[in-house]
Amino acid sequence: MLFSSSVFLFYFLPIVLGLYFISPRFLKNMILLVASLFFYAWGEPRFVIIMLVSIAMNYMYGLWVDKYRYDAKRLKATMVAMVLSNIAMLGVFKYASFFVENTNSLFGLNLNDPEIPLPIGISFFTFQAMSYVIDVYRQDGKVQKNPFDLALYIALFPQLIAGPIVRYQTVADEINDRRETLDDFVSGVQRFVIGLGKKMILANSCGYVADQVFNSPADEISTTLAWIGIIAYSLQIYFDFSGYSDMAIGLGRMFGFHFLENFNYPYISKSVSEFWRRWHISLGSWFRDYVYIPLGGNRSGPWKTYRNLAIVWTLTGVWHGASWTFVAWGAYYGIFIMLERAFLGKWLARIPSALAHVFTLFVVVIGWVFFRADNFPYAIDYLQTMFALNDTPLIDTAAQFYLVQYGAVIIIAMIAATPIPKWLVAQLLRHEVDGSTAVIRQSVGFIRVAGVLILFAVSISYVVASTFNPFIYFRF
């Protein structure tokens, strides 16, 4: 079930909200848990079993960690078993085919591909489950002895399928003790509508252009069209994923949960390191706190720091998908992060900020080619076309068509990816906090409500007119 579907918007969400708010306090978590399991089971009911196994397994690990806290040997064994079993579950469902394919290729074997279907969102709920046990181990959160409350934390439908990855310590208190307020509900609705608009209006429009370009042979498109395609994809993936995060944060707020931000205008960054502090913040902080720092971080000299960065970025690439293009994408960013730590960061800090910004955007856009391409040969051909290294024209009629038909949408998306719209809205609404008259405050409030309603109406028109349009990060 998609947030951007008619079923979710007009049936599932209103029914769940209604049942939730008319239910007594002691039933609210159960209402959300049942709704979340139903939400996940909507497309593939069998995958619910996988998630329930993960929940039960990590529930027991949490109890054992708490029980063996002062028994170092058993505690270590429990944590090792927790990590291995979670990684094994992720490996079987996400990487088995990749492993078989590469084993056959490397050793000339003919092993049968198990073709195990990928449970949607398995990377996200696995990382959340591991976060819970690690936080209990570190005493950053109390052990959850109620299995239904732990199940709610892992399966909560707003963030279940594509994040943000909600750390247990962030919402541990709100699982058992939260209070819904009108202000939170209103701001949640507003945030959800903004995310819906990002997805339906901007991401899908840019995605159409990107799909058309990337579905063409790389050596049969012009250099201009190649740049149009990758710029469109860069905007698509941002608005698609940040739109989902906005909707998840908004939904959580409607029910009294306060998830942390997951994006902070990454395309205004002036270094690659800054970009990754602003992009998919929950994943970056997860790898930092649960992998990079435990490995030693930057505390043991430069070479071990580079080793730790290499491990983290290799894992980041692998986490995104079972393909060598994702591994290359992770290694690509790992190299730039290491270069910035070695010398490049100091150079970027000294040059004009505009040049540092252009350099960062250039690196990021090139990286998205590997992320979007289905295989290495296509990625290399596409890059060659971008830099006029293939025998392709500089511009063709297809490029002219997309510039005319979608140029305005792409420009609007570029502007919307910066803080400019937020600044303009703040300027428009500044009278609300300037001690203005009641009439002005009422007018500002009316403008705010009208803007949200118009955005919702336009987004709904796209929902009704569109076919199946899953979010990009559903496959991770």
Image: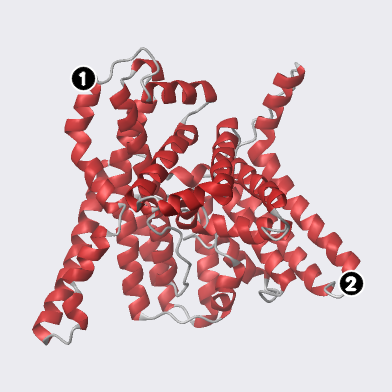
Residue 303 on image: x %, y %: 71, 48
Q: Residue furthest left?
A: 439
Residue 307 percent coordinates (x, y): 70, 47
Pointer 2 or 1: first along the chain:
2
Question: Height in image: 78 above or below 201?
Answer: below
Q: Left or right of 20: which side holds 295?
A: right
The amino acid on which the numbered mark 1 sits, given as a three-letter code, is Thr
Q: Secondary structure at mark 1?
A: helix
Up-down: is 404 above or below 285? above
The one nearer the camera, 105 or 88, is 105
Q: How many marks?
A: 2
Three-letter code, disc 2: Asp
Spatial CA span between label 2 and label 1: 71 Å
- Tell me residue 204's x, y (percent): 32, 42
Q: Which mark is residue 397?
A: 1
| Picture coordinates of residue 198, whole percent (x, y) | 31, 52
| Nearer to the camera, 366 or 327 | 366
Nearer-the-camera pick, 405 or 343: 343
Give above or below for 78 relative to 6.
below
Marking on residue 447: none
Q: Which residue is mark 2?
A: 71
Mark 2 in CB contact with mark 1 (< 8 angstroms): no
Q: Residue at x 49, y 45 (%)?
A: 474
Answer few, some or many: residues within 10 Å of disc 1's Cα (few below 14, many 20 plus, some between 14 and 19).
few
